[in-house]
Amino acid sequence: MVVTLSVPASVPSGVLNLDHEAVGALIRRWREDSGGTYRSWFLWEERTKNFRSIRRGIEQVVREMEADTFGVAYKGSSLETVVGSIAEQRQMFKGADHAFLWKPKLRIPDIYEDRDNQLAFARMLETCRCCTTEDQVLTAIRALAARGIKGLGPAAANLLYFLHPTIASPFNTAIVNGYNALTGAKVKLGKWDQYLAMREGILALNSAHRGLLSNDLGAVAGLLFDLGTGRYAPPPLSTEATAEARAAWEADLAQVRADAKAEKARAQAEREDVTHTEVQGWLRDLGRALGFQVWIAANDRNRQYQGARLADGCLIKLPPALAETSAAEAIGLIDVLWLEPGGRVAAAFEVEHTTSIYSGIVRMLDLALSGDPEAAHGMYLVAPDAREDEVRAQIRRPAFSRVADLRVRYLPYGELRANREAIMRFGQGLHPVEALARDLG
């Protein structure tokens, strides 16, 4: 069945003439695929945790650029921290930092040495951070595009996605390739006008299949990403949809990627989450044994641990002193909190298994600024032993200059694994944990 959409004339004709019955079948298969981006990234519980921290990071980038303290290098900058956090969003954004790396021979992207270009980039980010409407976002993009800044193309849309996920679509080579393969369009990389035209087509596609996709454009971008990487073959275009071509495509769809590669991706994602949950479970049991009340991150409460819910036996709501602050939502996403009977936070733990420490630091900063002067006295980054050098390197970045005031400490997995049972039997208060943790100063 070929469905014609009612969309603006600027939308590429491929979207207007898609066989939407076949596209719907593709989307349903994609939603069920444990190794596809829908289940491994879009439904990943950690995904939405990063939106707030990335927004805060963009605010920091803008502040430094406007104050002329950003510097002339990408490495070690607040922008590298934010883009690095985006690049760690599993496979969807792998390589997102490539477009921002300084290429000295080409002198691109030209936002490090050209002050006017840097300010124009900062204005675009700040406008999009503060605005609320689609027209405002598009006006800011067009104003930046009009400057023709060398090397600064629509890869910056990945930043905008985390500010306005219902307005700005993610952008990378695989998404463009997937869009072209699905629609027969010829969108090219590197130009904002090409991105905006593709965005119109993506919105039309998303509207036609809203019941299977989402208002969040990350979903449809994930579908296009999997098409662009070759995980799925696109259905034949309406002009090519012979019975034989359609049958061949349906056969391929039925068995697509039901192989070891998909299983490996699923298993790897599960291993990462299980390890993260296991460490949260260690901290939960240790905190309770030491006499503290325990809070588990709101979006992790229903995870399974040792045959039960991770949050069983823990607080079901934050104490009023925390719940009534403006940062309550962020504080509620801290992986594990230990609280004294009166509701004061004795210790906060962020488990950083594989991802950037940036979002965890932002949540701890929110806790420290929540109004309790004692809240910052027991803050710990809990990470694999092998990540200690990486954690120390990230803490030294200028973007984390305020972290020294928080006295955040590093608690390695190995120390917890080896000592937690003895501490549970003989320990008291925070002293045993403090003895295991390492200063990051």
Image (spheres, rainbow, N blue to C red):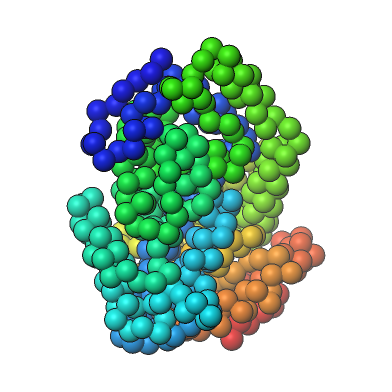
Asked whether residue 381 appears in the rendered view, the answer is yes
The quarter holding residue 191 reads bottom left
Classify residue 414 by image quadrant. Answer: bottom right
Q: Is residue 373 left or right of residue 130?
A: right
**Residue at 30% across / 38% down in the picture?**
11
**Quadrant assignment, res 270:** top right
**As drawn, 410 above or below 281:** below
Question: Picture coordinates of residue 376 (x, y %)?
Answer: 47, 75
Q: Answer whether residue 367 is visible to the viewer in this image.
A: no
Left or right of 395, for residue 198: left
Residue furthest out toward the top? 243
Residue at horizontal 69 percent and vertical 37 percent from the top: 262
> Residue 432 appears at what percent x and percent y?
69, 73
Is 135 left or right of 437, judged from the image as shown? Answer: left
Closest to the observer, 249 or 436:
249
Question: In this picture, is 177 found above or below 88?
Answer: above
**Position in image of residue 13 (x %, y %):** 34, 33
Q: Residue at x 25, y 28 (%)?
A: 6
Please provide percent x and percent y for residue 288. 61, 57
Split into 4 quadrants, where in the image is the N terminus? top left
